[in-house]
């Protein structure tokens, strides 16, 4: 990454933010991700939680019923977040350090999502 790159998260993040309720079935999360062509949703009233494609694949691989299993049963809790003014090089470093592919963007409230795909597209 160019060390002089001053691109901020706000310039690259995906908006509007797509959300899902913790008590929705996993199948609904999968449907929304496919419909919106995204790979993560912020869980409302989840207190810093997201559900990702990897979470859903894990549920299916474990043989869970995606109609009966709730998002709260498979979501990733206590996720790291970033602010809209953070530099992209810092986002890339955070994703590497925490081993994550998605970081919700927070500015008083959730405002967007930055993904490893966004970072890769920015770098190319």
Image: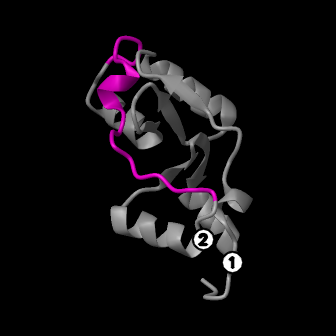
Image coordinates for residue 110, horizontal then vertical, percent: 57, 40
Element under disc 1: loop
Q: Which residue is mark 1?
A: 6
The residue that appears at 52% across and 25% down in the rendered structure is 20
Quarter of the image where one finds residue 9:
bottom right
x and y percent of residue 60 in the render?
35, 29
How many other residues sit within 10 Å of disc 2, few (<14), some (14-19) or many (≥20)?
some
Looking at the image, residue 110 sits to the left or right of residue 12; the answer is: left
- Picture disc at residue 87: 2
Rendered location of residue 44, percent (x, y): 49, 26
77 left or right of 10 in image: left
Q: Is residue 20 above or below residue 123?
A: above
Residue 62, quarter of the rendered image:
top left
| Secondary structure found at label 2 | loop
Q: Is residue 73 magenta?
A: yes
Instruction: Looking at the picture, tell me which residue is in the foreground, 28 or 21.
Output: 21
Q: CA distance from mark 2 to mark 1?
A: 6 Å
Instruction: Single out the residue that lies furthest toward the front.
Output: 108
Q: Quadrant of the N terminus?
A: bottom right
Residues shaded magenta: 65-84
Queried whether the magenta region covers residue 20, the answer comes back as no
Q: How is the image coloured?
A: one colour
Q: Are marks 2 and 1 in contact (CB under 8 Å)?
A: yes
Residue 108's disc number: none
Above or below, 117 against 28 in this view is below
Comparing 54 with 43, the one in front is: 43
Q: Residues within 10 Å of mark 1 (few under 14, many from 20)?
A: few
Q: Report whether 39 appears left or right of 24.
A: right
- Name which of mark 2 and mark 1 comes first in the sequence: 1
């Amino acid at each position: 990454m160019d060390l002089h790159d001053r691109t901020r998260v706000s310039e690259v993040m995906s908006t509007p933010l797509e959300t899902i309720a913790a008590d929705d079935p996993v199948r609904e999360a999968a449907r929304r991700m496919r419909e919106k062509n995204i790979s993560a949703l912020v869980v409302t009233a989840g207190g810093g939680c997201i559900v990702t494609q990897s979470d859903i694949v894990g549920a299916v691989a474990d043989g869970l019923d995606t109609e009966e299993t709730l998002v709260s049963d498979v979501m990733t809790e206590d996720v790291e977040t970033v602010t809209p003014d953070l530099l992209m090089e810092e986002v890339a470093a955070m994703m590497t350090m925490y081993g994550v592919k998605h970081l919700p963007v927070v500015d008083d409230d959730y405002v967007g999502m930055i993904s490893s795909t966004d970072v890769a597209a920015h770098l190319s």
